[in-house]
Image: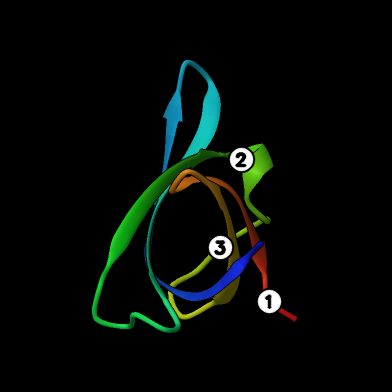
Amino acid sequence: MARQAVIHAVQPYDLHGIRYYAVRYAYADEPDALREARLAHDSIYADPKAGDQILVEAVLNIVTDITKAE
C-alpha cells in the first residue's frame, strides 16, 4: 500500500550511464522524520522536484516506486 509523502530534496546522478535519483522525503504522517531513497529513473516519475506530493511504495521499508500524487 502506497503512503503519502512530500519530497524535500532530489539529487539526480548517473551510474554506469543510467540515471538515478537520491530522494529525501517525509511521510505525511511523520513530517519531521526525513528519509532517503535511491531509485533508478524507471522507478520514479519524470522530473521530480522538492515540494512535490508523492506516493511511496515500499516492501519491508525498501522503496520500490515513487509516483506523483494526483
* Label 2, label 1: how far apart the Cα atoms are: 17 Å
Q: Which residue is mark 2?
A: 41
Figure colour scheme: rainbow
Q: Quadrant of residue 42?
A: top right
Q: Which residue is mark 3?
A: 48
Of the residues under marks 2 and 3, which one precedes in the sequence? 2
Q: Quadrant of residue 66?
A: bottom right
- Above or below, 30 relative to 11: below
Q: Position of residue 3 (x, y in %)?
A: 57, 70
Disc 1 to disc 3: CB gap under 8 Å: no
What type is the residue that disc 2 sits on?
His
| SS class, disc 3 | loop
Q: Quadrant of the N terminus?
A: bottom right
| SS class, disc 2 | helix
- Above or below, 15 relative to 1: above
Which callout, 1 or 3, points to the residue nearer the camera?
1
Q: Which residue is mark 1?
A: 69
| Mark 2, other Cα within 10 Å: few <14 / some 14–19 / many ≥20 | some
**Residue at point 50% right, 69% down?**
49
| Mark 3, other Cα within 10 Å: few <14 / some 14–19 / many ≥20 | many
Q: Nearer the viewer, residue 28 or 45?
A: 28
What type is the residue that disc 1 sits on?
Ala
* View extreme (right): residue: 70
Q: Position of residue 43 (x, y in %)?
A: 64, 43
What type is the residue that disc 3 sits on?
Pro
**Residue at point 67% right, 56% down?**
45
Disc 2 to disc 1: CB gap under 8 Å: no
Q: Position of residue 4 (x, y in %)?
A: 56, 76
Q: Position of residue 36 (x, y in %)?
A: 33, 54
Res. 2 in view = yes
Of the residues under marks 2 and 1, which one precedes in the sequence? 2
